């Protein structure tokens, strides 16, 4: 094996006896053994060029290669990035490793490598940077944030970064936050009751405990940072799993019992924050559905979207679709969404609603009447895609883009 001591003697001998490719292989092994990973990347590049019959170092920027050789060389360079990136991540060098893994595009391989790294005070920032900000594994990164940095910093992280990730990433992070906050709230409530009464409460939810001890919050007491409670109720709107929605509802019902000074106003259509949040979650859970829909329909009809945005309209459409009333959601979109105002993404698009209804004809007709050429094209192409998928028993999907 080539070592630091014999490097300058063995390589010329290897080149003379076995040729350039054998020497390049020996150089690769040397840098790998030394843990010199940046140098290893350069050695792998040289070896890849030799394997393709090219000089080990490009002669200059004007080098002209045929398409086949170019493709093979690019594949080899991606393989080199993967090799070096995984080695660096395995060595705990997170930011350096991700620099090589980014062009590879294999986020799962990077996530698997990062999963072996234990967080500490020295690497936590880099882990969060790659896992959350770069989107490699948002769920694990957000879990680390909650466990290492606490609720306040994690809520800030959600609003500043996670909120702009995919729906799946937002839901994964929101689920972690909701469970974390609800668990902390319940622990604090039980400790308070134990201190006051000398025994634990009977209730298994915050609502039940407050019903058991109705004067508990009358003096302005609270059991968790009140801004954390309201932020969690807001962030939880993205969730769909009933068990998580029940936790959000329970937090909101606790918040509704706080002293008025801690019941902060929200943004429309959640201006009356806790009462409207309770109605929202109850509707999703199949409780008082018509009353909840009536509340949000009235908001959607009363608020001028050109002055206050489309959040109220979109929330109502979203509620309708999430409880399975897709046709009504589609019709409401057509009726209420003003022309020339771009939706924010709270509600499903017309394309998504058409997919859920199982027919694209209403959208095609609407887009034609509005001279919406892009919307018409998207619906037409998606309807064809659905027909092909149905004929071949293949699943269909939409990317969630807000076309039309």
Image (tube, helix red, strand yellow):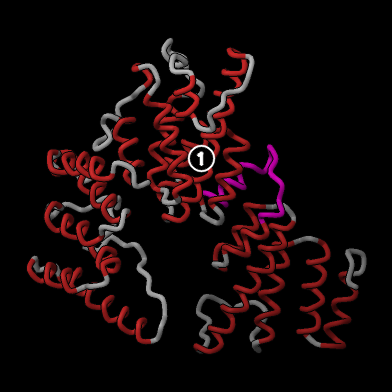
Q: Nearer the viewer, residue 190 or 184?
A: 190
- Counting from the top left corner in percent of width and height, residue 278 is at 34, 35
Identity of the residue drawn at 43% across and 52% down:
165
Residue in the foreground of this view, choosing between 85 and 232: 232
- Reply yes or no: does residue 129 show up in magenta: yes
Out of 389 and 104, give the one closest to the viewer. Answer: 389
- In the rendered structure, the answer to whether residue 203 lies left or right of residue 386 reads right
Residue at 82 percent of width and 69 percent of height: 30
User: Residue 75: percent from the left, percent from the top?
Assistant: 58, 79
Q: Is residue 102 shown in magenta?
A: no
Which quadrant of the view contains residue 214?
Answer: top left
For the image shown, how many numbered marks are present on the structure? 1
* Residue position for label 1: 177
Quadrant location of the C terminus?
bottom left
Q: In which quarter of the image is residue 168?
A: bottom left
Residue 301 horizontal/vertical position (percent): 13, 43
Quadrant occupied by the N terminus:
bottom right
Above or below — where is 157 with respect to 350? above
Q: Label 1: how many residues lie within 10 Å, few (<14), some (14-19) or many (20+)?
A: many
Q: Position of residue 206 (x, y in %)?
A: 48, 29
Task: Indicate the secondary structure of the residue bearing disc 1.
Answer: helix
Q: Give the range drawn in magenta.
A: 114-132
Q: Which residue lies furthest to the top in this view?
A: 219
Q: Which residue is drawn at 78% across and 78% down?
A: 25
Residue lying furthest left in this view? 369
Q: At 28% from the left edge and 53% from the top edge, which residue is drawn?
A: 347
Q: Report whether 98 appears left or right of 228.
A: right
């Amino acid at each position: 094996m080539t070592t630091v001591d014999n490097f300058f003697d063995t390589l010329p001998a290897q080149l003379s006896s076995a040729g350039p490719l054998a020497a390049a292989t020996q150089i690769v092994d040397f840098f790998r053994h030394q843990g010199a990973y940046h140098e290893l990347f350069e050695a792998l590049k040289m070896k890849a060029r030799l394997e393709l019959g090219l000089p080990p170092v490009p002669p200059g920027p004007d080098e002209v290669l045929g398409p086949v050789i170019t493709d093979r060389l690019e594949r080899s360079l991606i393989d080199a990035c993967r090799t070096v990136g995984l080695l660096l991540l395995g060595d705990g060098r997170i930011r350096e490793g991700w620099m090589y893994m980014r062009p590879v595009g294999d986020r799962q391989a990077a996530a698997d490598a990062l999963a072996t790294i234990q967080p500490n005070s020295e690497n936590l920032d880099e882990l969060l940077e790659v896992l959350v900000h770069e989107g490699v594994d948002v769920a694990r990164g957000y879990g680390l944030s909650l466990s290492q940095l606490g609720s306040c910093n994690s809520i800030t992280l959600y609003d500043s970064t996670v909120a702009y990730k995919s729906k799946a990433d937002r839901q994964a992070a929101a689920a972690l936050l909701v469970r974390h906050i609800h668990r902390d709230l319940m622990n604090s409530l039980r400790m308070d009751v134990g201190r006051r009464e000398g025994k634990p409460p009977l209730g298994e939810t915050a609502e039940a405990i407050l019903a058991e001890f109705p004067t508990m919050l009358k003096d302005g007491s609270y059991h968790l940072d009140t801004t954390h409670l309201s932020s969690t109720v807001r962030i939880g709107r993205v969730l769909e799993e009933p068990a998580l929605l029940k936790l959000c509802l329970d937090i909101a019902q606790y918040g509704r019992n706080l002293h008025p000074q801690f019941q902060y106003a929200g943004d429309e259509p959640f201006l009356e924050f806790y009462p409207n949040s309770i109605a929202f979650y109850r509707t999703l859970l199949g409780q008082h559905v018509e009353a909840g829909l009536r509340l949000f329909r009235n908001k959607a009809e009363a608020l001028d979207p050109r002055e206050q945005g489309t959040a109220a309209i979109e929330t109502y459409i979203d509620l309708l679709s999430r409880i399975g009333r897709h046709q009504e959601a589609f019709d409401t979109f057509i009726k209420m969404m003003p022309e020339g105002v771009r939706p924010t993404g709270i509600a499903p698009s017309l394309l998504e609603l058409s997919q859920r209804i199982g027919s694209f004809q209403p959208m095609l007709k609407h887009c034609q009447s509005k001279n919406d050429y892009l919307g018409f094209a998207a619906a037409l192409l998606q309807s064809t895609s659905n027909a092909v998928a149905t004929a071949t028993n293949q699943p269909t999907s939409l990317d969630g883009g807000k076309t039309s």
